[in-house]
Amino acid sequence: MLNTLSGRFLILTTIFVMLAEIMIFVPSIARFREDYLQNRLERAQIASLALLADDMIDSDLEEELLENAGVFNVVLRRDEVRQLMLSTPMPLDIDATYDLRDGTAMVLIRDAMRRLREPENKMIRVIGAPVQEAGLLIEVTVETEPMRDAMLDYGVRILVLSAVISIFTAFLLFIAVRALIVIPIRRVVGHMQHYAASPEDARRIIAPSASVTELREAEEALRAMQTELIAALRQKDRLAQLGTAVSKISHDLRNILTSAQLFTDRIGSSEDPLVRRMAPKLVGSITRAVHLCESTLAFGKAEEPSPTLTLLTLDDLVADVLDGERLAVGDGDLILSENIPPQFTLRADPEQLFRVVSNLVRNARQAIVASGDNGEINVSAYEDNDNWWVEIADTGPGLPPKAQEHLFTPFQGGASKGGTGLGLAIASELIRAHGGALELDRTGPGGTVFSIRLPKGEEI
């Protein structure tokens, strides 16, 4: 009960209402004391009027009048003359004097709280204004013990009433909170548990029904999340199936390419100068294809190989990439260039870096060719104190907004029609494995620039 939202709300409501009643209790006690003393003044005035009506009142009647008024003596000032109207012997000396005519709220509260803290009986003088303007002032002496007992009795009744009101109010709020908040929250939790049992079942998506705005917004947010999760799970299943198929294809393709490697060895012994010049490049391409198949198989097993870092000369690697792309361009007007300092050396995995650069250059070539315009692709490099930088810049049409939004997301960041979006995603993952980053520096009608950052770190 205490650990539930409704139970804690019930307890807190009771406490807060009691605190509010206590804040009301203090001025109420002060007001009760003032009314008590004012009542004694009014009774004393009535008793003194009886004496004014008949001067011949015996002592027994005078004592009875004072007893009924609850005072020991009465002094009435009329026409600037102070006159002792009624009097009886006082058991104690006067301890203090209180003038009710000019008492402020804070003074009344202070005097009331002081009286509650002092249990001993004392005699006090009370001064007030007569009712109906029957004189200038009236003054009486009273004991404090009966007044304090009356104040305590009144205070107890106020506290009991406050407790009843707070409990009743807390119960009503408990019912309201349970109906408006607790039950809808439990319904949402129930929907979440029901959905968790089978998150791919679209029939278990919550249907917002709460009447409270905040809870309805929570239900709508939950529905949106469930819808997105179902789509993500379905895509995950498709990717898993695709991964299985790609692994099987890569396995067979690796065997085919291995056989092709054997044939290229014989081609290399040809006497034809052109064949002898092209054979090494063909062998290199087939070798990289075999390595790609092997990496795909490893990726399908969730075992992407870690990069084997080594010092390499970047201009040789870029030259291989550009030579391969020039064969794809043929006699076209696309210019492939590089601006790399001589013997520029960096630390990376040669095969993985080749895949990244080749992917970026190929994407740029395809974009320029698809636009039907002439263009240029340039690969440049530089270094600073902490990093090596490789930039691939083109003068193509730029990336479309959709491709920029999901640039490195598999199956969503494809820039060309029919593209899968896997190339940039794989490239980004490979560079991250090096501890670096692949970033889009800028894109637009003037072209696109990608930068590869490779940290220098510790020397090998």
Image (cartoon, rainbow, N blue to C red):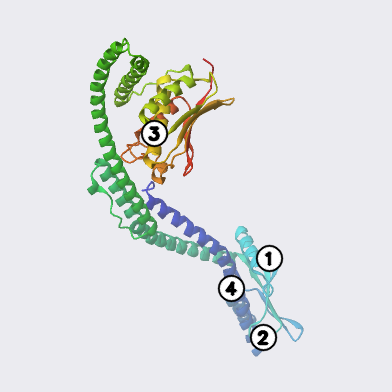
Q: Is residue 433 above or below residue 125?
A: above
Name the kind of residue labelled 3 in the image.
Answer: Gly
Name the kind of residue labelled 1 in the image.
Answer: Leu
Name the kind of residue labelled 2 in the image.
Answer: Glu
Residue nearest the observer in this picture, 428 or 282: 282
Residue 233 figure quarter: top left
Determine which of the numbered discs, if any, sits on residue 133 in the image: 2
Residue that label 4 marks: 35
Residue that label 1 marks: 92
Mark toward the start of the polypeptide (3 vs 4): 4
Q: CA distance from mark 1 to mark 2?
A: 31 Å
| Percent of width and height locating residue 326 | 40, 27
Q: Hey, which residue is sitting farthest front in the picture?
A: 272
Determine which of the numbered discs, if any, sits on residue 64 in the image: none
Mark toward the start of the polypeptide (3 vs 1): 1
Residue nearest the observer in this picture, 251 or 118: 251
Residue that label 3 marks: 332
Q: Is residue 312 above or below residue 332?
A: above
